[in-house]
Image (cartoon, rainbow, N blue to C red):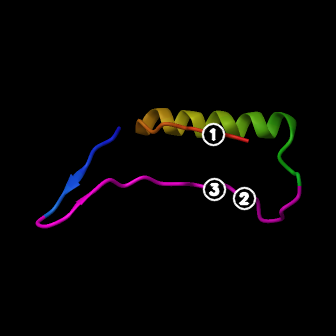
Amino acid sequence: MRDWQWQAHVKHYCRYHVVFVPKYRKKALFGALRREIGAIFRDLCRQKGIELIEKN
């Protein structure tokens, strides 16, 4: 997935860092909810051809 983008005088490689934070920064994501959200993120990454590097 390392596709360099070329324009007139520019060459760039765009990568993204996405952080998911609940509205109230409590430890609200436990158990089944945490597993379900993880499955949703993995499925979205698979559909878009994105590599999920880390999930805490």
Q: Residues within 10 Å of mark 1 (few under 14, many from 20)?
A: few
> For the residues carrying marks 3 and 1, which lies nearer the camera in this image?
1
Q: Which residue is drawn at 78% across and 39% down?
A: 34
> Which residue, as the protein is rendered here, is positioned at the far left?
8
Give the residue type that dot 2 points to.
Answer: Val
Span colored in magenta: 8-26
> For the residues carrying marks 1 and 2, which lies nearer the camera in this image?
1
Q: Where is residue 39 in the image (x, y as percent from the top left)?
A: 65, 33
Q: Is residue 11 left or right of residue 49?
A: left
Q: Residues within 10 Å of mark 2 (few under 14, many from 20)?
A: few
Tell me the tag on residue 21: 2
Q: Taken as a whole, is the magenta stretch helix, strand or loop?
A: loop
Q: Residue at x 68, y 37 (%)?
A: 38
Give the residue type that dot 3 points to.
Answer: Val
- Disc 1 is placed on an element classified as loop
**Quadrant containing the N terminus in the rendered view:** top left
* Residue 13 is a magenta residue: yes
Q: Is residue 12 left or right of residue 43?
A: left
Cβ atoms at labels 1 and 2 below 8 Å apart: no
Give the residue pinned by disc 3.
Answer: 19
Q: How far apart are marks 1 and 2 (CA)?
A: 15 Å
5 in relation to 42, above or below: below
Q: Which of marks 1 and 2 is nearer the N terminus?
A: 2
Tell me the tag on residue 14: none
- Disc 3 is placed on an element classified as loop
Q: Which of marks 3 and 1 is nearer the N terminus?
A: 3
Q: Residues within 10 Å of mark 3 (few under 14, many from 20)?
A: few
Give the residue pinned by disc 1.
Answer: 54
Q: How far apart are marks 3 and 1 (CA)?
A: 11 Å
Q: Is residue 40 left or right of residue 32?
A: left
